[in-house]
Amino acid sequence: MSGKGNAPIIIKKKKVIAGGGHHGGAWKVAYADFVTAMMAFFLLMWLLNATTEKQRKGLADYFNPTIPVNRISGGGDGSFGGDSVFTEETLSQNGTGASNTDSGAGKTDSTEDEETAEALEAKAFAEVQELLTAFSGESMAADEAMRHIVTRVTDEGLIIELHDLDEEPLFANRTSEPSEVLSLLIEMLSEVFKIVRNEIAITGYVQSQPLVVADNPVWGLSTQRADQVRLLLEENGTPAKRIQRVTGYADRKPAVGNPMAVRNNRVEIVLLRKQPGK
């Protein structure tokens, strides 16, 4: 009995970790924020894809405090003298009229005008390309002729390239005499050019000759072919004043790797971009 009374007393202490396992619940908040941000991102991507350029511009203008938000006057009495801050004449940022702003607003208007002009020009170029495609299927001759056309849009404008095929050249061999297919192509292009008023540039290119001669005809030939296209356009109703330049580049800018390839025989007709102020 005395031995049991002298036994040591053992105290067990249980360590309690506050906040639960896995380092608490703070990670859940961070994860929820991440999921919310990702949802907002994908929603933004969907909206950008689902709206038109005009709708996106309207949304951007709504959040821009330096432009009129509404063109309808509220006509109410108050500190603005009967004008609403949402009228065309009053800006919500500082209460001054849109027509009385400093030169910065003028620059903004000019930029918007240029962007509008560029959009209209891009639409016109797309219509030209669509009309050229529409000729395909009209007749067997049109289908054959369309094989000679390649179009592309550059900083200079819409380039319509007419090029030789191995079995069907646009000009008689080493001359500027046009073939029937070239005459048909120019006739079609003249009709298409009536829907736009862009000025025109014409450039001729030819393939390299296999032999080096003292009087290399490539310079004169490329220029003559470009000028022949000019004459055909004018004969088919294109006003002469629209044609701004006719040039020849000889064999200096081949379209393919082999400078002697037939594909390098080509004429480029460029619908030039309109210059600001014209």
Image (cartoon, rainbow, N blue to C red):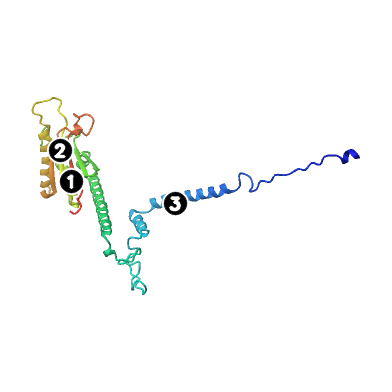
Cα–Cα span, label 2 and label 1 = 17 Å
Element under disc 2: strand
The image quarter containing residue 90 is bottom left
Residue found at the far right of this picture: 1
- Name which of mark 2 and mark 1 comes first in the sequence: 1
The first of marks 1 and 3 along the sequence is 3
On the rendered structure, is 253 left or right of 214?
Answer: right
Badge 1 is on which residue? 189
Which quadrant, please, contains the N terminus?
A: top right
Q: Is residue 161 placed above or below 276 in the rendered structure?
A: above
Would residue 139 be visible to someone looking at this image? no
Give the percent coordinates (x, y) of residue 16.
68, 46
Q: Disc 3 marks which amino acid?
A: Leu
Label 3 neighbour load within 10 Å: few <14, some 14-19, many 20+:
few
In the picture of the structure, the residue carrying the numbered disc 3 is 43
Judged from this view, the residue extending furthest toward the left is: 215
Q: Secondary structure at mark 1?
A: helix
Q: Is residue 91 above or below residue 150?
A: below
State yes or no: discs 3 and 2 in contact (Cβ < 8 Å). no
Closer to the camera: disc 3 or disc 2?
3
Between the residue at mark 1 and the residue at mark 3, the CA separation in whole angstroms equals: 45 Å
Q: Quadrant of residue 166?
A: top left
Q: Which residue is mark 2?
A: 204
Q: Amino acid at mark 2?
A: Gly
Image quadrant in which you'd find residue 269: top left
Residue 72 in picture, x, y percent from top left: 33, 68
Which amino acid type is shown beneath numbered disc 1?
Leu
